[in-house]
Image (cartoon, helix red, strand yellow):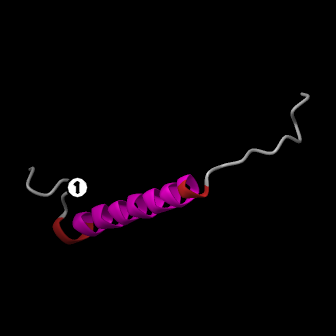
Amino acid sequence: MKYKNQQRDIDPQKISAERLNGRFALLGVIALIGAYISKGQIIPGIV
């Protein structure tokens, strides 16, 4: 492993985009749990 201590330069815009994507994914999971608790359906309108 010669490149063990090599540092990567990651674009700050990509970091913020991935952080925002993660937050929206968690918001979707919370909405899914809320729909399941309130209506008993995972996909509202089906079954």
Assess whether residue 40 is covered by the magenta stretch.
no
Q: Is residue 41 above or below residue 47?
A: below
Q: Viewed as shown, does residue 7 lie left or right of 40? A: right
Q: Viewed as shown, does residue 33 lie left or right of 35? A: right
Q: Viewed as shown, does residue 13 lie left or right of 34? A: right
Query: Where residue 9 sits in the image (x, y, percent)?
Result: 71, 47
Q: Which residues are magenta?
A: 14-36
Q: Viewed as shown, does residue 31 lie left or right of 26? A: left
* Image quadrant where residue 21 sits: bottom left
Residue at image x 46%, y 62%? 20
Which quarter of the rendering shows the N terminus?
A: top right
Q: Is residue 43 above or below residue 4?
A: below
Q: Is residue 15 above or below residue 31?
A: above
Going by the numbered disc 1, the residue's amino acid type is Ile
| Numbered disc 1: secondary structure | loop
| Residue 26 or residue 14, whichever sits in front | 14
Residue hosting label 1? 42
Residue at image x 39%, y 62%? 24
Q: Is residue 11 above or below residue 20?
A: above
Assess whether residue 25 is covered by the magenta stretch.
yes
| Residue 10 or residue 36, whichever sits in front | 10
Query: Where residue 36 sits in the image (x, y, percent)?
Result: 25, 63
Chief secondary structure of the magenta portion: helix
| Residue 30 or residue 41, whichever sits in front | 30
